[in-house]
Amino acid sequence: MATDSHAIDTQRKAGGRTVEQGSDRTTEAIRDALAGRRHGRFTFLLFAGPAVISSIAYMDPGNFATNIQAGAKYGYTLLWVVLLANLVAMVFQGLSAKLGIVTNRNLAEISRDHLPKPVVWGMWVTGEIAAMATDLAEFLGGAIGFSLLFGIPLLAGMAITAVITYGILLFERGGFRAMELIIGAMVAIIGLCYLVEVFIAPISWTGALAGLVTPSIPSAEALTIAVGIIGATVMPHAIYLHSGLTQARAPARDERERRALLRWSNREVVIALAIAGLVNMAMVMMASAAFHLGYSDVGEIETAYKTLTPLLGAGAAAVFLVSLIASGVSSSVVGTMAGQLIMQGFVGFNIPLLVRRLVTMIPAFVVVWLGVDATNALVMSQVVLSLALPVPMIALVWFTGRKSIMGGYANGPLLQAVAVLGAVVVSILNVVLLAQTFGLLDGWSAG
C-alpha cells in the first residue's frame, strides 16, 4: 500500500495533469470536512466528482443505440440486462475508486509496476482499441444529434462535436473541479431529459417490472444486443479512469482519512451509477413504449428521432435530441481523459491533447466516410468494448484482492467472489458472442 508521504506528494499531480488553484481550494475544503472543521447539508458535494465523471460513460450514445434497439425489438424483455450490467458496474467502479484512494496509483500504473512487460503492452493496446471504440460511439452520437438539429451532413456534425469537445477539454487546465462541474451539468441535463421522456411516453409499468425481474434472451440477435448493453454500460475506459480520478483528488494523509474517503466514494458510486442505471432503463422503456408495437424495426437513432415526432410529439423528439447531444459531447470529453490516462499509465508519457483527440477520432471519421450505417456502427462499437472489458476487470479484481498492494483494504471473500463472478459472466457472454459471430450458434434460441 502507498505510504502517506507518497500520497501527499501525489496530491498535486494525477496522470500528468497538475492540479490548479481552483482544485486546491476544493482539496482544502475536503481536508476541513475530513477533520471535522466543516459541516453542513451540502458537505457531501465536496466528495462528489470522480463517480459523476465516470458515470457519463454509462450514458453515452452507445447506450442510446443499444437501448433503442433493445426496446424497439424486444419491448421490456431486456430490462433485466440493463439492471444486471448496472450492478456489475457499481462493483467495478467502486473497486477502481478504492484502488486509487488506497494506493494513490491508477490501474494502468499498478499494472505497469506489477505485471510482465508483454502483458502490460497487451493491456495498453487493448485499452487503446477500447478508447477508439468509445470515441466511435461518442462522436457518432454527437454528430447524429447536431446533424438532425441543424439539418447538416454527418461529417459536419462530427466536426462541430470535435471543436466543442476540445474546447471543454481545455477547462481541465483549471484542475479537476472545473471538469467535474461541467460533466456534472451534462449528467443533470441527460437525467432531466429522460425524466421528461418517462412522463411523455405511455409506459407499461407492470411490463417494465416484469422485464426487470424475469431474465430472458429470446433469440441470438437479442444476445448480441444484450452483450452490447453490457459493453455500453460497463466500460473499460471508465474502469481505468476512475482510479486515476481518485488517486490525486485529496490523497489521504492517514488511515482515518483514507477510511473516510472510501466511505464517501462508495456512496458516490452507488448514487451516480444508480442515476445512470435509471437513465438507461428509461431509454429502454421509452423505446419500448414508442416503437415496440408497430415500429419494432426502428433500430436507428435517426429513425427513432423522426418517428418520435408523430408518435409522442415534437417536444419528446426535441428532448431526445438534447439528451443525445449532451451525451455525445460529454462522453467524448471523458473518453479523451481516459485515453490520456491509459497511455500515461502504461507507457509513461503523454502526447499533446489535440493529437490525442485526433488519433481516437480517426476511426469515427473513417466509418462515416465509408458510408457505414451509423447506429449499427454504434452497436458494434459496444460489442468491441464488451470484448475488451474482461482485461481491466480481471486486472482490477486481481490487484484489489492482494494484500501486498491493498494492505488491510484488500477485498474480503464475499466482495472478491462477487467481483470474480462479474468478470466470469462478462467473459462467458463474450465467448458466446464470438461463437455466434462465427456461425456456431445458428438456429440457437432461448427463452
Image (cartoon, helix red, strand yellow):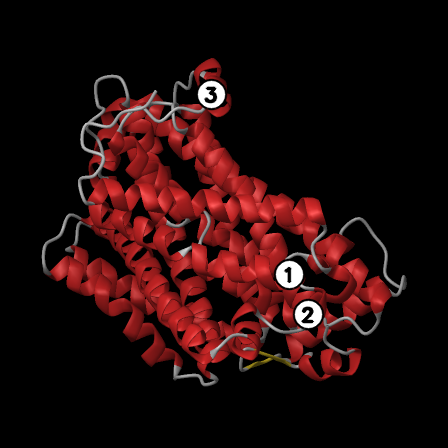
x, y (%) of residue 178? 57, 68
From where the camera sits, is residue 36 visible?
yes
x, y (%) of residue 176? 59, 70
The answer to whether the residues at label 1 and label 3 have Cβ atoms under 8 Å apart is no
**Residue at screen point 71% across, 59% down:** 410
180 lies above or below 106: above
Mark 2 falls on what kind of element? helix
Q: Which residue is mark 2?
A: 405
Mark 3 falls on what kind of element? loop
Density class for disc 2 (Cα within 10 Å; few <14, some 14-19, many ≥20) is: some
x, y (%) of residue 357? 34, 73
Q: Quadrant of the C terminus?
A: top left
The answer to whether the residues at label 1 and label 2 have Cβ atoms under 8 Å apart is yes
Q: Please report whichever mark, 3 or 2, sits nearer to the chain's N-terminal start.
A: 3
137 lies above or below 21: above
Density class for disc 3 (Cα within 10 Å; few <14, some 14-19, many ≥20) is: some
From where the camera sits, is residue 321 visible?
no
Q: Amino acid at mark 3?
A: Thr
Q: Which mark is residue 214?
A: 3
